[in-house]
Image (cartoon, rainbow, N blue to C red):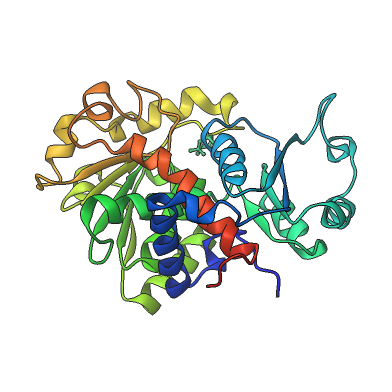
Amino acid sequence: MTRHLRSLLDLDADETARLLDLADAVKAEPAKYAKGLDGKSVAMIFAKQSTRTRISFEVGIHQLGGQALALSSSGGTGMQMGRGETVHDTAKVLSRFVHAIVIRTYGQAQVEGLAEHGSVPVINALTDLYHPCQGLADLQTIRERLGTTKGKKLVYLGAGNNVAHSLMLAGPRAGMDVVVGCPDSLRPNQAVLEKARADATKWGTRVAVETDVDAAVKGADVVYTDTWVSMGEEEEAKRLIEILRPFSVTPELMAKTGKDDSIFMHCLPAHRGDEVVDAVMDGKWSVVFDQAENRLHAQKALLLLLMGAESF
Ligand code: CP
Ligand code: NVA
């Protein structure tokens, strides 16, 4: 059966643990995996900008001995998808050429459609709804920094967006409680919240939404934030920045965790002075650049598993 990463719902808790162990192994001994994708090609379609995701996939595929094709979804050098070729036909054609498809786009339906109609693994490199590759690298980073994810509390502050949704699914898979601290008008998607809560019940953790920022951060082992204005929301920027101002992560807010050893995370890119201030980004709490690096290792592990070089 072809395995995909459309969202973290595609991995159970044991598979997530296996992937994280492999990500650590890949990080420790990259040379051991240098032929993992020998002779294989991966199409990478980007309909939105990217620094970390695109570069880490491209470099990661190269390090595994494979070929990465970085493609844009439209424009003069882009795919025919940008001129209306269907997801159905694109999936069928790409499956004749490449061994996996990585896609960053707007609608989650495109990711689901490629997986449904193609015959190769499809990896969601961010949609409006989910950012699962980020969630995996985040779990690897938390394990590295805190020794374990089990029993830890992650507090995400900001809009209930794609990154929040992936953390809500990542937490329960790794034995971690997740609290989304957000204004009432920017709560996470209800259907995703229900799925995350069902997973939390299954794996003995908790996923909650809290509109009071001080109550949210109390006891946090991890304070996490993301941009207040996601790609595609530029027209709403002024309104979002106004509503989210109280959720800005400052040293005073970090102190409200009540813990000396809590860490600060951000998927990046950061908007310094908005969702986080310099004193936190560059301060003792911050693990943001380890987190960015781990995109490379976690995604290499993901490719090895989905493309059959390693087994779950
Ligand atoms: N965190 C993340 O996905 O970054 P990019 O948008 O730069 O890929
Ligand atoms: N929520 C952000 C994440 C960027 C990595 C966005 O979708 O733009």
- Judge by depth and name the residue closer to the eye, 237 or 63: 63
Q: Number of labelled discs?
A: 0
> Residue 39, relative to residue 270: is it above or below?
below
> Residue 147, relative to residue 234: is it above or below?
below
Q: Position of residue 51 (x, y in %)?
A: 54, 30
Seen in the image, is 93 located left or right of residue 57? right
> Residue 26, relative to residue 56: is it above or below?
below
**Outermost residue toward the bottom?**
202
Seen in the image, is 200 located left or right of residue 232? left
> Residue 137, relative to residue 305: is it above or below?
above
Seen in the image, is 137 located left or right of residue 90? left
Q: Position of residue 182 (x, y in %)?
A: 36, 44
Residue located at (85% from left, 24% from top): 76
Q: Position of residue 86 (x, y in %)?
A: 88, 49
Residue located at (60% from left, 60% from top): 5
- Judge by depth and name the residue closer to the eye, 303 or 121: 303
Residue 136, by quadrant, is bottom left
Q: Quadrant of the N terminus?
A: bottom right
- Judge by depth and name the residue closer to the eye, 19 or 257: 19
Residue 3, by quadrant, is bottom right
Q: Position of residue 242 (x, y in %)?
A: 39, 26
Residue located at (49% from left, 56% from top): 32
Seen in the image, is 132 located left or right of residue 261? right
**Residue 140 seen in the figure:** yes
Residue located at (21% from left, 24% from top): 279
**Residue 127 seen in the figure:** no
Residue 82, by quadrant, is top right
